[in-house]
Amino acid sequence: MAKQQHPWWKESVVYQIYPRSFQDSNGDGIGDLEGIRSRLDYLVRLGVNVIWLSPVYRSPNDDNGYDISDYRAIMDEFGTMADFDALLRDAHAKGLRIVMDLVVNHTSDEHPWFVESRSSRDNDKRDFYIWREGKNGGPPTNWGSCFSGSAWEWDPKTEMYYLHFFSKKQPDLNWENPRVREEVYDLMTWWCEKGIDGFRMDVISMISKPDRYEDAPVYGGLYGSSSVTCNGPRVHTYLREMNQRVLSKYDIMTVGETAGVTLDEAKKYAAADGSELNMVFQFEHVDLDFGPGGKWYRDPMSLPALKANLSKWQNGLDGVAWNSLFFCNHDQPRIVSRLGDNSPASAKCIATMLHFMQGTPYVYQGEELGMTNCPFGPIENYRDIESLNAYRELTESGLRQPEELLSCIACKSRDNARTPMQWDASPNAGFTSGTPWIMVNPNYKTLNAAAQVEDPDSVFSYYRTLIALRRSSPWSRLIVYGHYALLAPEDPEIFAYTRELDGERLLVVCNLSPKARCFDLPEALSWKESEVVLSNQEPPALGRTLDLPPWQAAVWAIH
Ligand code: GLC
Ligand code: CA
């Protein structure tokens, strides 16, 4: 594909579906492909044009599909390949593209490659994975898995360790092996030939392992940091090869999930010359409330730090790469509970702040309704392997007190994003007629799609407007491509910025706090005329000083 200046993926809004929790069609309590197909009109109504599907491939579900045992088959619980084909066909007919989750840093341990690989030291597929001898009677290094415990698992059959940066049922593939890369390019081509519209690449920054296997620094836990494997020495070589072999042949979009990515690395991953991927997910902004010991320690998220971070990415990639804009996904607690106060006004305010930036926005299922974190209560109500393993390891080792840790897990657990989609006020929120695989957030009786879709003041309608402004309005080009400039960097409550393109300007002002605020616009900002583009409450009069009620967001075009 020749490189385009204004490719469709820059002008798109993506909606992420976590299939397990979106819509169940057969009463087994698990969302499925037929369920998704029955809800496509809802997405059309919202106005998004791309769906990213979290993994739907065959999987034993140790990590809800991020452990794949067959890349060319559909998970039994989600349906059949015929269901997938029907979903793709209907989505395309409605103007929706489908982006697949590509999980190729690791496979399931039940994938036939691994079954063979572990069968003997001289098996033909041995080198598809990373096997090492132990050291001093223990694992080869101190590396920890992202899901607790060592990243090395002892395999008694062949008496060696294999590497798994996630669960022990997710062995890491050995990308040094050209045969592994060929297999990956083959399966990608297979899906592209089917007509899918792109890939979201799971932890793609981790595929190239360090040259030397040495102990890593320990921060707050029992093991060495797994970040040793981010942005490894050959990651860009592999992605350029993948691009030449597969991506460049199709008009598809690609987004890399790049844990540990820096601005300089992102300029390579998402380079404007199209040599690797279209864009990356960086995580600095959503990790700002990590404590010094990582995710399971809480620090408040300071607004000046958030502004500085997002502004760094806005300005740093302008013209040289491309941002993805997100706060929510299946690994993140709900932003309205994190940065907001669970109110619809705060949901709209946060959305305004994000959706007027440069980049491609991602909406995660339920975010468009203002879905909140879930009061799970005891640890037994959680399902996520990451939360469950952390709880066990940190309490059993005595490093943390159960109650205190549980309160942290309540704020941070990935399960907050994974409760069933709240469709209506009927039992189980209209998600299933059976028993849902994970609890439904009890607030579904009032917080649901049915109550919002027709209500012009709802969070849903507000997202619909945000998306329409970006996709088809007089300001579309400015919203998608305009240059960004932050105002009042030190203000602890107001997030304000301008966007500018060819002499046109937008002014975005968000009071990200539950208090009323007065805000003085900087002296240097001047305009003769203004027009309100959007506001989540009665818009304040635009003068040098703005009176902003709690959670006010307002956008003006200024000339
Ligand atoms: C990514 C996914 C996450 C998964 C992990 C291992 O971070 O988003 O859900 O657990 O990779 O595949
Ligand atoms: Ca089902």
Image: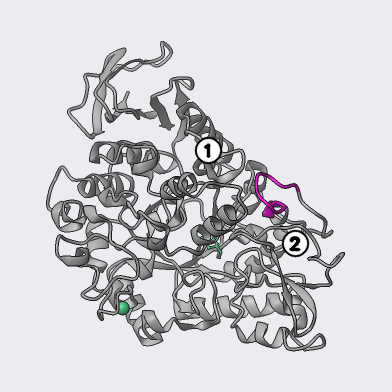
Mark 2 burial class by Cα count in 10 Å: few <14, some 14-19, many 20+: many
Amino acid on which the number 1 mark rests in the picture: Leu
The structure residue drawn at horizontal position 34% and vertical position 43%, both measured from the top left corner, is: 336
Residue 119, position as x, y percentages in the image: 73, 88
**Residue 479 % position (x, y):** 38, 40
The residue mark sitting in front, 1 or 2, is 1
The amino acid marked with disc number 2 is Lys
Q: Nearer the viewer, residue 555 or 529?
A: 555
- In which quadrant is the C terminus drawn? top left
Most extreme residue toward the right is 136
Left or right of 2 on screen, residue 470? left
Q: Which mark is residue 209?
A: 2
Assign a secondary structure to mark 2: loop
Q: Residue at x 61, y 64 (%)?
A: 166
Disc 1 crowd rating (10 Å Cα; few below 14, some 14-19, many 20+) is some
Find numbered disc 1 in the image and state the secondary structure of the residue it sits on.
loop
Residue 220 in magenta stretch: yes
Spot occupied by residue 552 in the image (x, y as percentages of width and height): 27, 29
Q: Quadrant of residue 414?
A: bottom left
Residue 288's disc is: 1
Q: Which residues are magenta?
A: 217-227
Residue 431 in sight here: yes
State the image quarter where residue 476 is shown. Answer: top left
Query: Looking at the image, is mark 1 or mark 2 earlier in the sequence?
Result: 2
Quarter placement of the N terminus: bottom right
Mark number, residue 44: none
Does 55 sit left or right of 398 as displayed? left
* Count of numbered circles on the image: 2
Q: Can you say whether 469 is above or below 247 in the image?
A: above
